[in-house]
Structure formats: C-alpha cells, structure tokens
Image (spheres, helix red, strand yellow):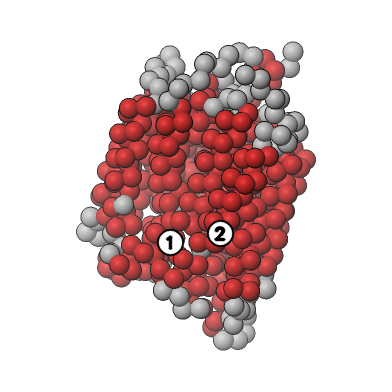
C-alpha cells in the first residue's frame, strides 16, 4: 500500500452535518473579509498617508506589514487550528481581526496604523486556514464539494477586486478610516453565525509545538517576501532559513508542517499553481490601479468600478464553469487552461499605451483574467485539501493559503521592481514611461502565469471525481 493511500485510509468521513450549508455562508463572510483586506486599503493609502504625515518611502508598510505577518504566520495558524479546534480558532481569529481593525481605524499616527495592519495579518493567518479546513472536512461528496469550493474560490478570486471597489467608495464618500472600520460589523456577523452553527470540535491531543520550526518558517517567508525590495542578500537568507526548516521538519517528532503534505504531487502542484496564479493577478491589480488613477485620471470610486468586470467574470467562471465541471473532469483540465486564459488576459496588458482606451483593451483583459483565475482557484483549493486526515486539515489549508499569500506578495513586489526599472530606463514623457514600465512587467506576468499552467498540467495527475451514489 502506498503512503498516499495509507494516508487517505486512516480516517472515515463522518455523516454530513445538516447545518453545513448555513455554516458555509458564515465561513464565506469571514473569507470575504480577509480577501477584501488584501486590497481595500490600497486605494485609501494616499489619503491615509496625507492624514498621518507618512513619507513616500514608508507608505508601503501599510500593505507590507499585513502581508508579512499573514504569510509568515500561516503555518502556525493552521497548526493552532488543528490543536485548538476549528470552531474555537475561527472565533478567536474573527475577534482578533475586529480588534486590530478598530485600532487601525482609530490610529493617531502612522506607526500605530502599521502595527494594526500587522496585527490584522497575524489574526488572518489563524482565520484563513481555519475557514478552508472547515470546508475541507465538511464537504466530502463531489457535487457538494464543488459547490462549496466554488463559493470559496469565487471569493478568493474576486475579493481583491471587490476590495478596490469598496475602498474607493468608502474613501471618496466617508473617510479612509472606514476601510478598516468596515471589518468590525463583518466580523461580528460571521462570529455570531459561527458560534451558532459551526460544529464544536475538541481539537487534537496537545503535543509539543515545534517552536524552532515556527521561527524558521516565519523568518524564511518574511525574508523571501521582503527580498524583492531589500536585495539578493535577503533572498539568500530566506532560502537558507527555508532549507533549514525542511531539514528540521524531516527530523522532528511533531513537525509544524509534515513533509508528506508537500511531497504529494497533487497538493504540491496545486500549491505551485496557486502561487503563480495569484502572483500574476495581484500584479495586474497593482498596474491597473496606477494606470487608471495616474494615467487615465480616474477617481478612487471610478477606479474601483473599473475593476467590477473582473469580479463579474470571476463569479461567472466559478459558478458557470468550475463548479459545474469539477464533478466530471480532472482538476488539471480546469486549472491548466484557466491559467493559460489568465495569461492571455495579462498579454493584452502588454499592449497598454498612455492613450489606450479602457473599453477596448483593459476591459477584455479583466474579463480573461477573472475567468481564468477562477477556473484555477476553485479546483486548486479542493485538490490541495482533498483526502487529508482531518487532524491535519488546518496545516494543509494553511499551506495553500501560504502559497497564495507568498505568491501575491512576492509576485507583486517582483513585477513592481521590474516596472520601476523599465520606467526609469525609458526616455520620454512621464506618462509614457510609466505605461512602458507596466507593459514590460506584465510581459513577465504572462511568463509567471504560463509556468502555473505548465505546473498544473504536469504535476497534477488526479483523475476526475468518482461518481457519488446516494
């Protein structure tokens, strides 16, 4: 018997909980809050910077602090969810995120805002893998699983765009602080619902926490994300720390991340594909945000509305394509073409010019990106957590979330650095130079997305789901 087969036979799925669909609604609300916060503050950043007197060099920390805390602590968050119980971890994550949002909204100075964003990221690192693991163990039948992961995947694929729209509206009509305050009622709603309908769980028997593994994983991922702006030396440090982390996990009795989760080719392929897809999508968000507001002179609200077609396309891809085909086709039959379609959308953005029209170039690119990314994310989340022992569902979910977060953070920073270099080397008007930088960087974004398509096609070999007989 293979190791993979032995792993999947160590447990039997319990009878479905009759409240699982109601629970899905509140899990989706929590996931939407996390997805929104990846971008909702971005459009508000100029106003926050002006109000709190931050420098141009420091302003990026509002985004980076969240990303570093989130990406660096995800594995720990998944482990805590496995040991403490998913319901308890879910409620703690929501409460902490709400408190951090209140602190950030009321921040009297820039340092407090940055600290609050880091605290948001820390609690998101607990909440995100908990939400995904709740889905993984609650929905095991192919049709139901396809629907549940379509909800989750559509939120993951479109939440960032919704955040840009909502952030633009709140900043323009209320104040930038409401981009943080808005999380409080969302967290309260999800918390009350979760308290009432989520199944109680006792968690695992307590074991020694792998503290060296926590330090090595968090330090390695933080160094990896920050290396794109701090230089090659920090990249080497990040690589060394992660190598030591793998060495440590292979030899400790209670690993933070059991390596069998990574060495399964379907999960590993899903992690790589998710990282590449999110890197490309977040790169598109960054460039289009600046293109719309700086080059085309859109207001924050107009820029947010301009992203709406991507959101609609993402929802259509999730519900009309991915969720309908998942019960009948192999995951890579959706993921590889989806990444290729997203690459085609990114390729359109390489044709941007200072006088390009939104309707004839940006809009088609958004539609292709939305459709493609959603067809990647829905089956990827399902495949990355399928067949896992429920006692390790939290850490498996944390790993796919880590791939998503690191992919978005590192990809955005890398593509931004390429864009800045290309802009600086261009001899011409400022607007033309800026758009030239975007075009060069999006070319590399196409390469990233195609790597994701190849990874899905080559590494993921699981077949189509077996038909379920009631």
- Residue 160 against residue 204 in the figure, above or below: below
Q: Nearer the viewer, residue 399 or 157?
A: 157
Can you name the residue that lies furthest to the front here? 470
- The quarter of the picture where residue 371 lies is bottom right
- Residue 23 against residue 8 in the figure, above or below: below
The numbered disc on residue 310 is 2
Residue at 59% x, 73% y is 359
Can you name the residue that lies furthest to the bottom here? 429
Distance, label 1 to label 2, CA atoms, is 11 Å
Kindly tell me whether residue 115 is visible in this rendering.
no
Q: Nearer the viewer, residue 117 or 324?
A: 324
Q: Identify the residue under disc 1.
A: 165
State left or right for residue 57 relative to residue 106: right
Query: Which quadrant holds the C terminus?
Result: top right
Upstream in the sequence, badge 1 or badge 2?
Answer: 1
Can you name the residue that lies furthest to the right here? 458
> Do tag 1 and tag 2 residues touch (Cβ < 8 Å)?
no
Residue at 42% x, 32% y is 22
- The quarter of the picture where residue 283 lies is bottom right
Percent coordinates x, y for residue 459 in the rendering:
74, 37
Residue at 27% x, 55% y is 105
Disc 2 element: helix
Disc 1 element: helix
Q: Nearer the viewer, residue 435 or 222?
A: 435
Percent coordinates x, y for residue 325 in the rendering:
68, 39
State left or right for residue 346 relative to residue 167: right
Residue at 61% x, 13% y is 10
């Amino acid at each position: 018997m293979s190791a993979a087969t032995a792993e999947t036979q160590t447990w039997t799925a319990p009878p479905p909980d009759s409240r699982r669909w109601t629970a899905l609604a509140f899990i989706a609300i929590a996931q939407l809050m996390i997805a929104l916060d990846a971008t909702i503050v971005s459009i508000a950043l100029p106003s926050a910077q002006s109000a709190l007197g931050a420098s141009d060099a420091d302003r990026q920390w509002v985004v980076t602090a969240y990303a570093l805390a989130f990406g660096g602590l995800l594995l720990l968050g998944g482990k805590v969810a496995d040991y403490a119980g998913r319901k308890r971890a879910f409620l703690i994550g929501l409460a902490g995120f709400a408190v951090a949002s209140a602190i950030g909204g009321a921040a009297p100075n820039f340092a407090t805002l940055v600290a609050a964003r880091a605290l948001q990221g820390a609690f998101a690192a607990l909440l995100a893998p908990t939400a995904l693991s709740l889905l993984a163990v609650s929905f095991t039948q192919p049709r139901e699983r396809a629907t549940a992961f379509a909800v989750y995947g559509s939120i993951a694929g479109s939440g960032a765009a919704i955040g840009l729209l909502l952030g633009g509206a709140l900043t323009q009509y209320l104040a930038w602080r409401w981009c943080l305050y808005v999380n409080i009622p969302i967290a309260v709603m999800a918390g009350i619902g979760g308290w009432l309908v989520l199944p109680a769980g006792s968690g695992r028997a307590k074991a020694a926490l792998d503290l060296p593994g926590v330090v090595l994983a968090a330090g390695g991922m933080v160094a990896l994300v920050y290396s794109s702006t701090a230089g090659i030396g920090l990249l080497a440090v990040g690589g060394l720390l992660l190598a030591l982390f793998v060495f440590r996990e292979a030899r400790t009795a209670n690993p933070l991340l059991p390596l069998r989760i990574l060495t399964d080719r379907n999960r590993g392929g899903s992690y790589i594909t998710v990282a590449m897809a999110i890197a490309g999508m977040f790169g598109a968000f960054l460039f289009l945000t600046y293109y719309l507001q700086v080059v085309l002179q859109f207001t924050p609200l107009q820029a947010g509305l301009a992203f709406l077609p991507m959101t609609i396309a993402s929802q259509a891809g999730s519900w009309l394509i991915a969720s309908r085909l998942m019960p009948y086709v192999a995951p890579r039959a959706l993921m590889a073409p989806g990444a290729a379609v997203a690459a085609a959308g990114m390729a359109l953005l390489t044709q941007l010019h200072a006088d390009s029209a939104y309707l004839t170039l940006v809009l088609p690119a958004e539609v292709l990106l939305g459709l493609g990314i959603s067809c990647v994310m829905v089956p990827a989340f399902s495949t990355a957590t399928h067949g896992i022992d429920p006692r390790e569902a939290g850490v498996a979910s944390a790993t796919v979330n880590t791939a998503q977060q690191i992919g978005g953070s590192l990809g955005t920073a890398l593509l931004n650095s390429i864009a800045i270099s290309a802009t600086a080397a261009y001899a011409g008007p400022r607007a033309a130079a800026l758009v030239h930088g975007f075009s060069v960087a999006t070319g590399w974004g196409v390469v990233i997305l195609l790597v994701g398509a190849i990874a899905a096609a080559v590494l993921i070999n699981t077949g189509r789901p077996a038909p379920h007989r009631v």
